[in-house]
Image (tube, rainbow, N blue to C red):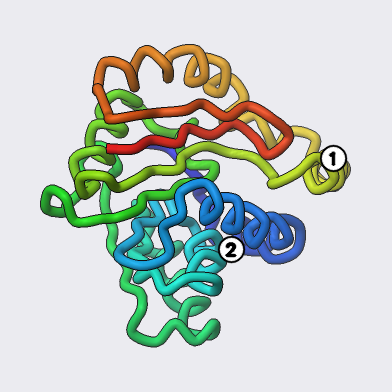
Amino acid sequence: MKGATDPQSFDHIVKEIFAPIYPVIADQIVRRTEITDGRCLDAGCGTGALGIALANITDLHITFFDQSEEMLDLAFLYAQKNGLDKRFETLCGDIHAVPLFDEEFHLVVSRGSSPFWNDWRKAYSEILRILKPGGMAYIGGGFGNAELRDRIIQTMNENNPDWRNSFKDRIKPEREALPGILSSLRPSRFEIIDDESGFWAVITK
């Protein structure tokens, strides 16, 4: 699985450009899933911005999960700074073989990680495996709303016109494959959202 390779650069972008999107997306997740307590896995968490935004508006215990120890160190630091205290932990690993027991989580979230997954079927199978019966996943990418999307894309294009190169060729194949993959995994329910909030799979085990 390939993802962000420069944690410091990624951290700068999250703090200086992407920061406004995470509270918006966290609110959308809570409104759609209605899950406000229990255990949440922030998969491909990077520096933990989405998980922290969720923790700030819920009673969820967050597990920050990423393949990069450097990213997890930053997530740990920011979670502490946000006063999460004993409501979080970090875990290093691969989404294709999550080092967790079955049915541990009420909610799994991920923003911006899935285009980098090498085997989408295996990754989503692992997500369903670790969800409790009735648990939900909210996986995808987006900027929360059209205003934030347009502003951030303009800023990113000005700063680095090639910023999408690492994943742009993966987005269309993932979106085309996802309905068939999810149907084959047979969750209780799934919905594909494709609107100004972004492209998201909302899955109920």
Q: Quadrant of residue 41?
A: bottom left
Residue named by callout 2? 8
Q: Residue furthest left?
A: 101
Residue 25, horizontal then vertical, whole percent: 61, 52
Task: Tell me which residue sits at (16%, 50%) in the image.
Answer: 103
Quadrant where the image shows the C terminus: top left
Judge from the rendering whether residue 137 lies leftward or rightward of residue 25; answer left or right: left
Residue 83, horizontal then vertical, whole percent: 49, 87
Residue named by callout 1? 150
Judge from the rendering whether residue 28 lies leftward or rightward of residue 123; answer left or right: right
Residue 59, horizontal then vertical, whole percent: 42, 74
Q: Nearer the viewer, residue 195 or 62?
A: 195
Q: Nearer the viewer, residue 35 or 13?
A: 35
Q: What amino acid type should be assigned to the residue bearing mark 1?
A: Asp
Mark 2: secondary structure: helix
Residue 161, horizontal then vertical, whole percent: 80, 35
Task: Tell me which residue sits at (68%, 39%) in the image.
Answer: 197
Q: Quadrant of residue 157?
A: top right
Task: Tell me which residue sits at (28%, 62%) in the image.
Answer: 91
Mark 1: secondary structure: helix
